[in-house]
Image (tube, rainbow, N blue to C red):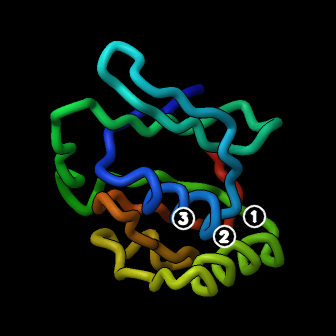
Amino acid sequence: MRVARSCCDFEAIKAFYCEGLGFALLGSFEGHNGFDGLIIGHPNAPYHLEFTIEHGVTAPRAPDHEALLVFYLPEREEWQKRVDMMRQAGYEAVPSNNDYWDQVGITFEDPDGYRVVLQNRAWST
């Protein structure tokens, strides 16, 4: 799965998702039909994130505080490692708009106002 969205600043996005969350820069492109882009993720994961900048266009900020990307990290040690990485990279947690996410998780806001939740539980339907 690819989750794609526009952004304003590649360097800030790389810092947040790569340095903070521990993702890798998997690829990039320039001048593709008026767009530049970054592909970020984990090499063996079944998903990746695509961030684009359209030439001459300023990307809007997140529409609200419920624009979330949630990562379920059920093992406490791995969850704590990711939280610590975010803090060491200089990112502070923000209170969730919906306090459900604060019960066993922590929320961070990326440079464009989109929120990432690190949830310390397994995902289930």
Residue 117's spot in the image, x, y percent? 50, 64
Q: Residues within 10 Å of mark 2 (few under 14, many from 20)?
A: many
In the picture, the quarter occupied by the C terminus is top right
Q: Residue at x 70, y 49 (%)?
A: 24
Crowd tier of the residue under label 1, counting other residues whose Cα lies within 10 Å: few below 14, some 14–19, many 20 or above: some
- Left or right, residue 123 beside residue 51: right
Q: Earlier in the sequence, mark 3 or mark 1?
A: 3
- Residue 120, label in figure: 2
Amino acid type at mark 1: Pro
Quadrant for residue 31, please give it.
Answer: top left
Instruction: Report if the CB atoms under discs 2 and 1 are less than 8 Å apart.
Output: yes
Label 3 or label 1, whichever lies nearer to me, is 3
Q: Is residue 89 left or right of residue 65?
A: right
Residue for badge 1: 74
Residue lying at 44% horizontally and 72% vertically, measured from the top left: 108
Residue at point 45% right, 82% down? 93
Q: Is residue 65 left or right of residue 80?
A: left
Q: Secondary structure at mark 3?
A: helix
- Circle 3/circle 1 CB separation < 8 Å: no
Please, what is the three-letter code of the amino acid marked with disc 3?
Ala
